[in-house]
Amino acid sequence: MKRDKARLRQEIILLVVIKLIAIAALWWYFVRDARVTVTPISAAEHLGAIQRSPTLPGATHDQ
């Protein structure tokens, strides 16, 4: 019985290691070079601190 548990433990460890290697390889291939630029204005807009009014360039405002 001990032998079966030891073998099962080894198989589980091997599978976890294989999955970690696969995840690392996928990240390395697809995500590693992805970059997102965040400016303070875009972050504030995303958080709702600033709201821009959608206007056309050069349009006049009637107030």
Image: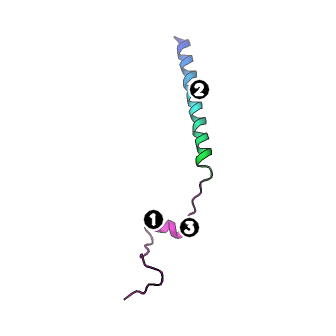
Q: Label 2 to label 1, Cα distance in Å?
A: 43 Å
Q: Give amino acid for label 1.
A: Leu
Residue 34 lies in quadrant? bottom right
Give the label on residue 13, or none: none
Residue placed at 44% from the left, 74% from the top? 52
Q: Label 2 to label 3, Cα distance in Å?
A: 44 Å
Which region of the structure is painted magenta?
A: 34-63
Disc 1: which residue: 47
Q: Give amino acid for label 3.
A: Thr
**Crowding at mark 1 (Cα within 10 Å: few <14, some 14-19, many 20+):** few
In primary-sequence order, the first of circles 3 and 1 is: 3
Give the label on residue 39, or none: 3
Residue 28 lies in quadrant? top right
Between 6 and 20, the one lying in front of the other is 20
Q: Give amino acid for label 2.
A: Leu
Residue placed at 54% from the left, 68% from the top? 40
- State whether residue 35 is above or below residue 55: above
Q: Residue lying furthest bottom in this view?
A: 63
Between 60 and 14, the one lying in front of the other is 60
Of circles 3 and 1, which is in front?
Answer: 3
Between 17 and 31, the one lying in front of the other is 31
Residue 21 at what x, y percent from top left? 61, 35
Residue 23 at what x, y percent from top left? 57, 39
Disc 2: which residue: 14
